[in-house]
Image (spheres, grey):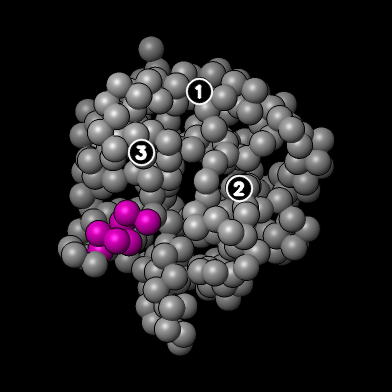
Amino acid sequence: MIPLRHLRLGVNIDHVATVRNARGGDNPDPLRAALLAEASGADGITAHLREDRRHIRDADIEALMAGIAIPLNFECAATAEMQAMALRLKPHAVCLVPEKREERTTEGGLDVAGDDNRLAQFIAPLRAAGIRVSMFIGHEARQIEASARIGADIVELHAGHYADLFAEGETARAEAELQALAKGATLAHSLGLEVHAGHGLTFENVGPVAAIPELVELNIGHFLIGEAIFIGLGPAIEEMRRRMDAARN
C-alpha cells in the first residue's frame, strides 16, 4: 500500500496570457498571476510555450524564471528551438507535449513509443543539464514503458478523456477511464517514474483523480483561470487545494 503524501498543485498560467494577447499590451500579466498563485499555495507554475506563441511568449518564460521562487514546469514540443531555450534557461522541469497548430488545446498524449529513438536523443542533453524531463502521455502501458525506457523522470497522464466523460454524465465510462488512469499510475510508479496528471480537472472532478495514491502532482490551468473571473485567482487555487487535500485525507 502506497502511503498518501502531500499532492502538489501546479498552476498553469497560459490563459492569463491568452486574455492579454486578445487585446495586446501588457495586461493581465502572467508573472503577476504566477506570483499570486505562489502566494495562494501553488507548489509550481506551468507554462506552455507553443510554436505559434498563441498565449505564452518567450519573454514570459524569461520573466517567470527570474520572478518566481517555486519550480517552473516548461511545457513545449520536442523541437530544436525549444530544446535550446530550455538548455539556456534551465527550468526545474521540461514537459514534452504533442502540438498541432489547428488544435484549441492539447488533444492527447505524446506518442513516445512511436518516436522513442528521437525522443531519447532529445532529452539526453536536458537531463545532463540537470533538468527533470516529463512526458505528457495517455495511460497506455506501451507509452508508459517507452517513457521509462528512454530515461524520462516523470510521466504526466492526460486526464482530459476522464474529464470529458465526467462532464457528459457518462458515469460508467468515466469510472472505467478513472480506473485506467489509476492502473497507468501504478505501472509508471513501479517503473520508477514520478507520476503527475493534468488536463480538464475542475472542482467537481478532481477528487477521484487526487485520490490515486501514486500521483504526486496535478497540473491545472484553464479551469482555475476561468474560475478566477468569478471568485478571484487566490480563492480558486485555495479551494482546489482544499479539495485535493480532502481527497487525500
Q: Residue at x 40, y 25 (%)?
A: 177
Q: How much space separates mark 1 and mark 2, taking CA atoms?
A: 18 Å
Q: Earlier in the sequence, mark 3 or mark 1?
A: 3
| Residue that carries the numbered disc 2 in the rendered image | 97
Query: What's the amino acid at mark 2?
Result: Val
Above or below, comparing residue 4 to residue 223 in the picture: above
Circles 3, 1 touching at the beta carbon (< 8 Å):
no
Span colored in magenta = 222-228
- Image quadrant occupied by the C terminus: top left
Q: Is residue 162 above or below residue 232?
A: above
First of labels 1, 2 by sequence position: 2
Rate crowding at label 2 as few (under 14), some (14 to 19) or many (20 or more) other CA atoms within 10 Å.
Answer: many
Q: Amino acid at mark 3?
A: Ala
Q: Is residue 79 magenta?
A: no
Q: Amino acid at mark 1?
A: Gly
Q: Is residue 9 left or right of residue 235?
A: right
Q: Under tag 1, what secondary structure? A: helix
Residue behind mark 1: 184
Pointer 3: residues within 10 angstroms few (<14), some, or many (20+)?
Answer: many
Q: CA distance from mark 2 to mark 3?
A: 19 Å
Residue 91 x/y as whole percent: 60, 57
Residue 143 visible: yes
User: Which label number is shown at residue 163?
Assistant: 3
